């Protein structure tokens, strides 16, 4: 069974950092592009970042570029999202997903990704 589990969310003050983890099971994580998404209250889910398994190319949305870093550790079947200089508008439930059958992201991840995790809450507030 394909499964992704996110962890690492929490509540922080503006300007602080958090690291999220996305661990896969039931499939070969290193074969597929993995994306991070977020959904704020009352807003649509948006793609935040993606990492290609083929060559490690990374992509970021304009809203997080320069502040967030996606990375991978395939030995641990895990993809990470390091979030620095967090802002209140980063508050959302963060999800990861795999694009089964695709090793390249091609850009910021879209809604056609598969195998969604359950999400982890990130709250940025003073």
Image: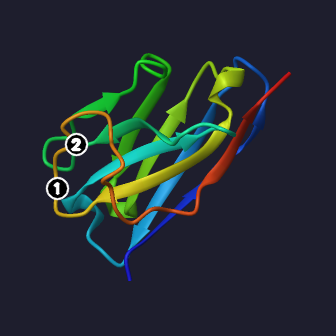
Q: Work out whether residue 89 or residue 15 is closer to the camera in this orientation and state it.
A: 89
Q: Work out whether residue 85 or residue 119 is closer to the camera in this orientation and state it.
A: 119
The image shows residue 78, relative to residue 3, as above or below, that is: above
| Crowd rating for badge 1 (residues with CA inside 10 Å; few <14, some 14–19, many 20+) | some
Q: Which residue is mark 1?
A: 102
Q: Who's the residue at 54% across and 41% down the image? A: 38
Location of residue 77 (image quadrant) = bottom left
Left or right of 82? Residue 103 is: left
Which residue in the rendered view is the most extreme toward the bottom? 1
Q: Secondary structure at mark 1?
A: loop
The image shows residue 52, relative to residue 113, as above or below, that is: above
The image shows residue 56, relative to residue 25, as above or below, that is: above
**Rendering coords of residue 37 (x, y %):** 47, 43
Q: Who's the residue at 35% across and 79% down the image? A: 26
Find out whether the residues at labels 2 and 1 contact each other: C-beta distance under 8 Å: yes
Quadrant of the frame with the C terminus: top right
Q: How many marks?
A: 2
Q: Which mark is residue 105?
A: 2
Q: Who's the residue at 39% across and 25% down the image? A: 61
Q: Secondary structure at mark 2?
A: loop
Q: Work out whether residue 72 or residue 63 is closer to the camera in this orientation and state it.
A: 63
**Rendering coords of residue 2 (x, y %):** 37, 76
Q: Who's the residue at 67% across and 39% down the image? A: 42
> Between marks 2 and 1, how big is the CA–CA gap?
7 Å
């Amino acid at each position: 069974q394909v499964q992704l589990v996110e962890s690492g969310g929490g509540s922080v003050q503006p300007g602080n950092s958090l690291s999220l983890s996305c661990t896969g099971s039931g499939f070969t994580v290193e074969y597929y592009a993995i994306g991070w998404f977020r959904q704020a209250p009352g807003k649509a889910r948006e793609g935040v970042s993606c990492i290609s398994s083929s060559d490690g190319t990374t992509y970021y949305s304009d809203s997080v570029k320069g502040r967030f870093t996606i990375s991978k550790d395939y030995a641990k079947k895990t993809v990470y999202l390091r979030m620095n200089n967090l802002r209140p508008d980063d508050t959302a439930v963060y999800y990861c997903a795999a694009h089964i059958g695709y090793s390249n992201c091609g850009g910021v991840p879209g809604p056609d990704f598969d195998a969604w995790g359950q999400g982890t809450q990130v709250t940025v507030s003073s």
